[in-house]
Image (cartoon, helix red, strand yellow):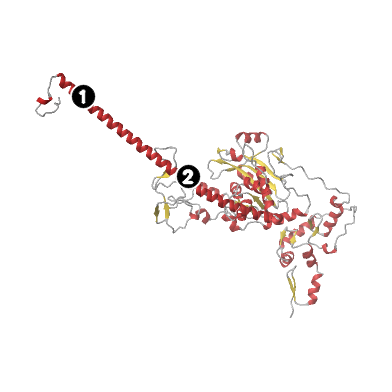
Amino acid sequence: MPVFTCDPCNSTFWSQESYEAHFTSQLHKRITEVGTRCVICVRDFPSAKAFHEHIHNSARHAELLREKKLREKPQAKTQNRGPNPLPAAMANPFVAPCHQCNRLFPSASDLQQHLTTAPEHDPNYQEPPPPVPGWIANGVVHNPSQGFRNKSEGPVWTWFPERSKIRWDVLKTLQRACHPLEELKANKVQTAPYTQAEILGLSRCKTCKGFRKDLDTYSLCVYHPGVFQKPKDNPNGDKFYTCCSARSHMEAGCSTAKEHNFADPSPIILREAAEFEPSPPADGSGRKSRAVALDCEMVGVSNHLNGEVVWMTVVDYVSGATLIDTYIRPEGRVNDWRTRVSGVDASIIRDAAERGKLLEGGWRAARNLLWQYVDAETVIVGHAVWNDLKALRVCHSRIVDSGIITWKACGMHRQWGLRALCYGMLGVDIQQGKHGHDCMEDTLATREVVLWCLAPQNYDKLKKWGDDVAAEEEIRKLRAKEWGKYKQNEKRKEREAQDQAAREKMEKENAESRRKRRTIADDDMDYELECAWEMDWDPEESEDGGVQIF
């Protein structure tokens, strides 16, 4: 018996009549025209079969659809501004798209109301000009052209027209670029709350100082029993181990033990591990952003391992609109402001508090503010974003990291700086200020780098950049190796010169000591002879025939 298959709908039919009837069905029209997205639940499905089962069997979908019908008000009579006929294939009870605005509507009536009332469909409508490149941070307007050196003309940051199809394409490309969980875990991203085994893996060996998660429990413990210190006779010299004269922690230990001596995790590690929480689940309301760019600046705080967030900026990835840009008052006592990097000091925090622009409550308040725009389905874009999420104690699994994209492009596991990426890819110099980094600048720069890397027209450019960087890295390693050999030879010559100078100094001191002893002996001899002449004593008359000693 022949089998008939509809590939777009992923459906199978056993007769030609049912197969031909399927082409006129509402499900086939919806799949071919719109896709497999349910706007009621805000979910995408991999196949038409899965979407069909969701529509007819999902209790959640039925509940949301019932609530929508209860909230739906009678449509007001409006004047038709132009001939915008509604295609018959779009008239279905689930979703109706407007291809001109790239928007989805839950019903044909909603789409018809949009076509007749939206100003974009007015024949006399003119789209407003794009805004001036710039952004508002803490009440101050920042212009990207100030303090930047761009190789090419035009605005620094990419702006997409509102209601343009490219926004939808950019979002879909970003969602497909999310890193797998294994890749995120390998790059220190915490995708779920800590388990007991992961907390136990944070304990360190007292002898070799390694973490349990990175060591084999049954392997030998290789360590240095000596102390890593500077030479006592040369305070400016290089540190070395007193046991084997090794001059680096990276050199293999000189002693071994049969097993590791792991200590219990410190109370600070246990407390911070317990504070991690996952992002809230998607509620289907559509109020949360689908993709954001995140950057945080941290300061050193007592009783914290990696510092605490003091400045947080969140930007919508697609539109570039600023969602969050605020200073945060740290909970603990600040022992290092890290102003050279964070761009924040005590005076800035006091000024923000006086102006009412300071968020109280520490990292917990910052995390709650972030969760007003981010849920579990939101894609977070960042550069080495595991640092930011760790400071906020957030577990997230939908992440696109510019650092991971770039090291995969060049084929080597190395974290490139954001400034180097912006200059190498975009021809833009950032972080030129003398007072530390600008969190807003870093956020927009990260967004720009990811946009450039994921753009289809830049695939070949990204590959070429990766090849060039890999070649430069190999040359740098060779030069570093040669430079290391040169420095070793210089240090060896310096040590030999020091040893030669010490030997010459010692020989000189010994010669001076011998000279002094000879001088004393000669003086004693002269004194004895002088005494003998004064006493008219003849040496030849002495019994021993020598000089008489008095």
Q: Nearer the viewer, mark 1 or mark 2?
A: 1
Quarter of the image where one finds residue 307: top right
Looking at the image, is 521 positioned above or below residue 324?
above
Which one is nearer the viewer's eye here, 70 or 152? 152
Q: Residues within 10 Å of mark 1 (few under 14, many from 20)?
A: few
**Is residue 42 left or right of 78 when viewed as pictured?**
left
Q: Quadrant of the N terminus?
A: bottom right
Dot 2 surroundings within 10 Å: few (below 14), some, or many (20 or more)?
few
Q: Is residue 269 left or right of residue 446?
A: left
Disc 1 to disc 2, C-alpha distance: 57 Å
Where residue 339 appears, x then y in whole percent?
Answer: 59, 38
Residue drawn 50% across the image and 49% down it? 481
- Which one is in front, 448 or 288? 448
Near-viewer residue (216 or 288): 216
Please state which of residues 508 and 218 is positioned toward the viewer in this rendering.
Answer: 508
Measured from the top left, where is residue 518 in percent x and y? Answer: 25, 30
Name the image quarter holding residue 27.
Answer: bottom right
Assign a secondary structure to mark 1. Answer: helix
Horizontal and vertical percent position of residue 531: 17, 21
Q: Name the N-terminal-most of marks 1 and 2.
A: 2
Q: Amino acid at mark 2?
A: Lys
**Mark sitting on residue 184:** none
Q: Residue furthest bottom?
A: 1
Q: Label 2 belongs to which residue?
A: 487
Q: Name the side, left or right, on which 537 lies relative to 321.
A: left
Q: Amino acid at mark 1?
A: Asp
Residue at horizontal 13 percent and vertical 19 percent from the top = 536
The residue beneath circle 1 is 526
